[in-house]
Image: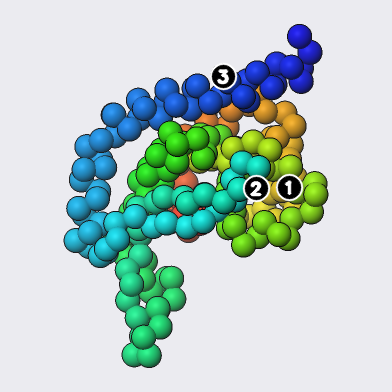
Amino acid sequence: MNYQGKRRIYVCFVKRALDVLLACILLFLLLPIFLFTAPAVRIRLGSPVFFKQERGGLGGKSFVIFKFRTMTDDKDKNGELLPDDKRLTRFGRFLRRTSIDELPQLWNILRGEMSFVGPRPQLSEFLPHYTEEEKLRHSVRPGLTGLAQVSGRNALRWKKRFELDLFYVEKVSFGLDLKILFLTFGALFVRNNDSDIESFYDR
């Protein structure tokens, strides 16, 4: 079997099966964290507990991504929301620093809207502006982490991010996914300042 045949089998069957298995295991193991975080978010940051946003997914179809909210709804005297940095509390920073806010995306993975590894999903409003080449990033499921996120994070220009996304789409394999997961795990523990940590995922 040639490379493209092996790639198709991995992307269509093996990768998805591994995603479901790992998501189920993590949801079970991390249940205590969910049970602690949800009420803590409700008390400290308000309702709703989950932040929801439309992102572009597989085949360019939109889906709703889930995260624990990390900001309040504080407003100014005119009723307008305050800037993000004014609404991001110490508790919110903790959720981002530990990536606990990303855990609800395990549900997105279980539902088949995301994978553990793939191009990070961008806002749906960007979809009409992609070139034909850039649209190829949607030929695989978007990921909780991806090649661009372990290759420079927000220090990368958009063009370079898309280049890395397209490289991943072309070269996707079990070995590459394993390497990205390993680098992601390492990156979460070696960063020393909040700004770097918070920019690890595209927010």
Q: Secondary structure at mark 3?
A: helix
Left or right of 58, for residue 53: left
Is residue 93 in sight in this rendering?
Answer: no
Residue 107 lies, in percent from the top left, at 40, 39
Label 1 environment density (alpha carbons within 10 Å; few <14, some 14–19, many ≥20): some
Label 2 environment density (alpha carbons within 10 Å; few <14, some 14–19, many ≥20): some
Say whether disc 3 or disc 1 marks the residue closer to the N-terminus: 3
Q: Which residue is mark 2?
A: 60
Q: Are the residues at dot 2 and dot 1 in contact (C-beta closer than 8 Å)?
A: yes
Q: Is residue 169 above or below residue 77?
A: above
Residue 5 lies, in percent from the top left, at 74, 17
> Which image quarter: residue 74?
bottom left
- Label 3 to label 2: alpha-carbon separation: 22 Å
- Label 3 to label 1: alpha-carbon separation: 24 Å
Identity of the amino acid at label 3? Val
For the residue pair 164 and 124, the one nearer the viewer reads as 124
Q: Which residue is mark 1?
A: 135
Q: Secondary structure at mark 2?
A: helix
Say whether disc 3 or disc 2 marks the residue closer to the N-terminus: 3
Q: Which residue is mark 3?
A: 14
Is residue 81 in sight in this rendering?
Answer: yes
Identity of the amino acid at label 1? Lys
> Which image quarter: residue 163?
top right
Disc 2 versus disc 1: nearer the observer: 2
Residue at x-position 27% and y-position 63%:
47
Identity of the amino acid at label 2? Gly
